[in-house]
Image (cartoon, helix red, strand yellow):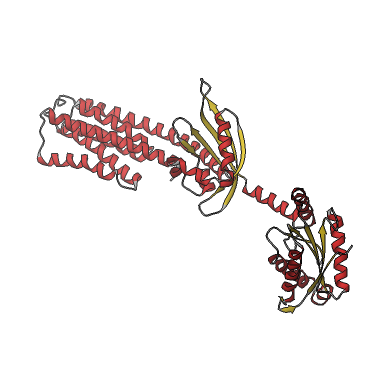
Amino acid sequence: MDGSTLITDQRNFIMLKMLWLIAFTTCFFDLVSGRHYAAWQYLVMLIFLLLPILLLKVKNFPRSGYFLSMLLICYLGVRFFWHPSLINLLTLYPGLLLVMVYQNPALILSAGITITLVSIGGVYLQADSMMAAVTGMQVYWLSIPGLILTGIMLVLNRFYTVAGRRAENHQQQWRNIQEGLGVSIWSYEINTGRLFLSRGAEELIGLPVDWLIKQPEHIRNLVHPYDSLRLFEAYKELLAGKNKILEHRLLLADGSTRWVQNLAIPFKSQTGETTRIDGLIIDISEQKNREEKIKHMAFHDQLTGLPNRTMFENYFSLTMAGERNREQKLALIFIDLDNFKQVNDAMGHDVGDMLLKEVGQRIKTVMRENDLLARLGGDEFIALLTSIAPETTTLVAERILDSLARSFTIAGHELRVSASIGISLYPEDGKDLETLIKSADEAMYTAKRKGKSGYYFYAG
């Protein structure tokens, strides 16, 4: 149920309660004035007065509402039919005005005809009433106000229906824009704690908007823990009267994460106190995902997914900045596969590419968490070991060789490869990355000359 339907139903509920109140009041005044009815008339009145209580609880409100409206109108008409009087006649017209709230032409027309017929019939059949002296032509004149009022209401109903449809179309267009662009409007009243959220938030957050409005404290749980402190600081600046544009993450109930851009504007009272904050939330998850993909492509090898040389250089610079203070050693390991060209020539480049991916994953599994493995290109890999001792470097090199000693199953083929490893140490074998790579490369070629499938430290 959308917002406009909910508002219409609430308005119609109020209209039905007012009709019921009119019916109850007329019955009450008759009783206190001493007017008596037959037993069956009391039963009819009781049904008319109790039925609204039952029908107002029916979930299918439009159908039950139309039926109930006509019952109440008929009840007011029957009262006039039993006891024609100006007072009972005048009670019919407020009922006729109230049914226009439904904006239903059939209901208005039927109510108008009912009132007109009952007006005429009540005067003719109740000759002993206070209106018995009214002549036939005057009776017809009595029906004219009801017909005129019915016509006016039909015209007004048409006008309001057209205007309502235009407003609904505009609202639907705005909702489509919100849903298509992932936009949600929000407003928060600081003193009362009241929150407004547009329907766009429902698709963004995945939770009912009405539930969040009733329990706004749950919105805090949607903010990613890494961003909660930044939002708290931004809220303090908003209270100080500053506009804020903030990008942060939402942690949804299903465990997924969405990036949003939150534009917030504070509004101050005449005393200068911030009383309300209005904002616009835009879903920028796709934009962030594209940025992450571009960033990943810039710093990772497209084949193996391992860091590339650019990322390796950046990591080395950051590591060196920290290691200078601790004066700990670094080790650079240069890995070159043996006889990889023969595999490429015999099996094709597709098999060769799959083999390189498997090799990269195997080497990565034996590295320590604080070490970085990258692919330089071709069949060459490079690793940076931090906070090492000489025996640590030897252990890592032996683990790499052992991991590659097991055969690989690629596209149904059982393949075996080995690697030659060259090792250089910082600062003995170089104080910059280029020198360390060159030293490790020379050590790797020494390992190849010594029979391959082994490791060798740079000897200077």
- Is 92 located above or below residue 393 in the figure? above
Q: Which residue appears at 71% of the width and 78% of the height? A: 412
- Residue 413 in the image: x percent, y percent? 73, 79
Furthest residue toward top? 270
- Position of 341 with respect to 164 (left or right) is right
Q: Quadrant of the C terminus?
A: bottom right
- Is 100 located above or below residue 54 in the figure? above
| One can see residue 11 in this view | yes
- Position of 221 with respect to 113 (left or right) is right
Q: Nearer the viewer, residue 3 or 260?
A: 260
Q: Which residue appears at 45% of the width and 30% of the height? A: 191
- Position of 212 with respect to 437 (left or right) is left
Q: Nearer the viewer, residue 69 or 183?
A: 183
- Which quadrant would residue 349 be assigned to in this image? bottom right
| One can see residue 120 in this view | no
- Residue 186 in the image: x percent, y percent? 52, 37
Q: Nearer the viewer, residue 332 or 145?
A: 332
- Position of 6 with respect to 134 (left or right) is right
- Residue 203 in the image: x percent, y percent? 52, 48
Q: Nearer the viewer, residue 232 or 116?
A: 232
Count of numbered circles in the view: 0
Q: Which residue appears at 33% of the width and 29% of the height? A: 149
- Is 327 located above or below residue 449 in the figure? above
